[in-house]
Image: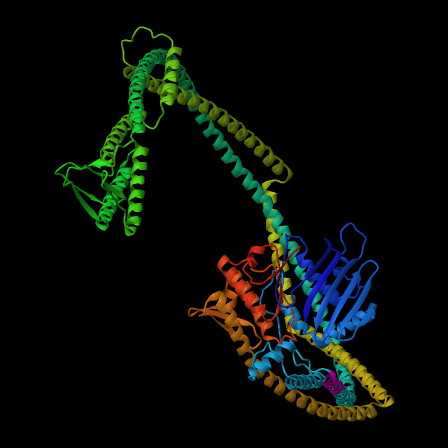
Amino acid sequence: MRLHRLALRDFRGIGEREVRFADEGVTVVEGRNEAGKSSMIEALDMLLKYRDSSKSAAVRSIMPSGRDVGSEVEAEISCGKWHFTYFKRFNKQPATTLTVLEPTPEQLTGRDAHDRVDEILDSTVDRALFDALKLLQSGTDPALTDLSAAAALSRALDRVASGGGDPAGSSDASDAVDTEDDTVLLDAVTEEYGRYHTLKQGKPTGELATATARSTAAGERYERLRRAREVLDDDIERLREAVSRRGELQRAAELLRADQEQVDTVWQAAQAVLSKVADAAQNVGHRRTALTLAERVLDERTDIRRQRAAAAAEAADLDEQLAGIVADAARALSEATALESELYSARKVLDSLREQLSAARHAQKRERLTAEVAELTDKLDKLAGLGAELDAVDGELATHTVDAEVAAAAQALAGRIDVARGRLEAASATLRVEMLGDLPVTVDGAAVGNGDAAEFVAVADRVIEADGVVRVTVRRSVDTRSLAEELDRLQWSAQNLCDTHGLTDLSQATAKAAARTDLAHKRALICERRDGLLKWKTVAEIRDWRDVVRAELDGLPEAEASQQESVDDLVEAERAQADLVGRAHAAAVRRRSEASALGERQESLSARRDRAGKQVDDLDARLAELVFALPDDEATEAARRARDDLKAALEAQTRLAAQAAELDAAGIELRREQIARDIAHGDAELDAVGHLITELSTKLEVYRSESRLDEFDEAQAEWEEACAVLRRVTRRAEAAKLLYETLTRARLASRAKYADPFTRRLDQLGAIVFGDSVRFDVDDDLNVVSRTVDGVTVPRDDLSGGAKEQLGLLSRLACASLVDRADGVPVIIDDALGYSDPDRIAAMASVLTEAGRDAQVIVLTCSPQRYADVRDAHVVTV
């Protein structure tokens, strides 16, 4: 397949565009971002895939924004023996037109044109290969997709693996027929295998799944009816047992009811005796209550007398305590008053000392601020002098530009000049001119003295002349020209260095550098003295601080006459007097607190004395009321009578309890309750057995009426037939599976051989990018597993983004160069190599040039410089 021309009109952001592509080699379509380069690939895919009347979201999205017009796409394509022009208009007034140019002219429109193009492409273009050889801006892994369905690539690799020669060459008819026959056979076997198993997971489907489902359903129905038949036999046996059990339960119930009548008679006699025992127990309770009440009356009077004696003793003790507390409170109050008087005098002395201390501190602060202002003024004067010295030194340094580095450069340059001059003189001729006669002789215009000899080296052209007789020109040797030029260049550099730094010659540089070093040392000493005075501050900060101190000094009032005592003595006296005041204050507060506490204690004891006296009066009144209501001797007699009555009631209760024990009333009650439970249990079981007999009888009658036995026989026959059908289908399915797996293994073995020519071609192209040592490990599905360069192997997933992108492009170009020219498809690359460095980009350009000899390569890019090195590329600007 070859794409010759692609034209777009009103396609998304593209108004109108037509691009022609080179049939062989590389076509580079360059343009800015959003120029519609990727839209051209989308337009080609949409032309070949969608009908003009499609309402899909992809088709609706290509309509230009703000314009109600149709989007048009036209392409001129060659594939196989066909050469045609294909046109479609989408969304508005849809239309499809096909114009076949070769081999026989045709013109079709509408759906007929769409179907005809599909028929041509299906018969001549490997669509799986066409999709795989695109490298788009999708952001996904640039690795090749599955190429198992790429028949064109399979044919090419089959031929190369079998020794058929150049894959890009033309294939003979026999190879094509063999490949097609193999494909037809595999398709037929796959179709037969698909009748029984799913292709992906090998699960039963079709006839095998149907036969299996029918056998399973018939088996389940037979098993269900068989279990129902077994349940019926169990029900018949259970019915016989239930009828027998019902007779046994009826006889046992009659015997239990006779025993119940006898036990009821004995139980009623025992209940009469138990009633008398209960009455005796109730009488004992009443007598015990009467005794408790009588004893409570006596106990209450004893308790009142005890409480009255305790309250009287407490009142006497409180009277004694009150007398002592009153005396202590009066004494504490008098002492507190005396202490407060002493505290007042001590505070007056303390206030006087504090006034004297404040005046002394004020005078001391004024003296300190005066001294600080003087010190700061002296420091500023010294800093001003040092600043002047530093300015003078800086001025001298500005005129001395020769430092150690410049001096070293001058020395090195002088040495190089000496060496160059020596080399030049050694390579040049040395001439000696001596005047022998009376005629004057000159060398470069300078006269040679009589009897003198002049020697010079011919490092430049020299003219020796005897006036009116001869002129000799000694020219510099060609071999010494470069040495002379080198000497001139070094001398020019020396003169430039001297002019820059004010030197008469290079020898002065060392002295100048030493003088600059002395000045720098002097400047460092001045800076050190200045920094010592500054102490991490600036002159402005010191001046500002002096102004602050001076302002504070000016704001202080004039000091009074000096005190006799020093500040330290006054501080010590003030501290001693403050301590004395504190102790006096604490003693006065403490004594006043004690007096207050004694007063509160007196009030508390008085309240308690009043409560104790009131309690004595209340107890006397209560005791008088009780004695008036019932004298003490009568209360004692009532208690004695209550004890006698309780004793008699207890004796009667003991006698009746002995009679009840002899009857064993509890045993009779238990026997009576057991017989009742047995009768109830027997009746319940008899009812359950009756219900069971009724249920089983009904089920047996229903089974007989529904002909379940005939249904069971029918299910058994159906299950046996389904099992037979399943065995036959299973044998056919296993045979199809065996043939499919055998052919698949053979094809996989053949595909394993495909990897070798693909790997060789990939190594050839990869050597241009990664070097001659590169080797690729390729699996049977033509996926690159790893890359080895200089003996270092790196898995493909661990390669950088740029290397993965380069490898994806290499794989596509390798496939394109392996496929026959008749079966080939364009390699479309949309703005790749964005992660590649300049060296790799240049190498990939060579790869594209190499691959373009065997395939049509279309590159779309917004960076034309990436593909500038592709030779003989057809460049289109959009």
Viewer-closest of 298 and 237: 237
Q: Quadrant of the C terminus?
A: bottom right
Picture coordinates of residue 743, whole percent (x, y): 62, 86
Q: Main secondary structure of the magenta part?
A: helix
Callout count: 0
Q: Determine whether 52 is above or below 555 in the image.
A: below
Taking 37 as reference, is 753 left or right?
Answer: left
> Quick check: can you spot residue 266?
no
Q: Which of the colour schemes (rainbow, by chain, secondary structure, one colour) is used?
A: rainbow
Residue at the limit of the structure toward the top, as seen here: 561
Picture coordinates of residue 612, whole percent (x, y): 53, 31
Q: Residue at x 15, y 40 (%)?
A: 435
> Quick check: can you spot residue 623?
yes
Taking 203 as reference, is 539 left or right?
Answer: left
Taking 780 as reference, is 365 left or right?
Answer: left
Q: Determine whether 507 is above or below 478 in the image.
A: above
Residue 44 placement: quadrant: bottom right
Q: Determine whether 692 is above or below 388 in the image.
A: below
Span shown in magenta: 206-217
Residue at the limit of the structure toward the front, as seen here: 468
Viewer-closest of 500 and 818: 500
Residue at the limit of the structure toward the left, as seen here: 451
Asked if residue 208 lies in the magenta stretch, the reply is yes
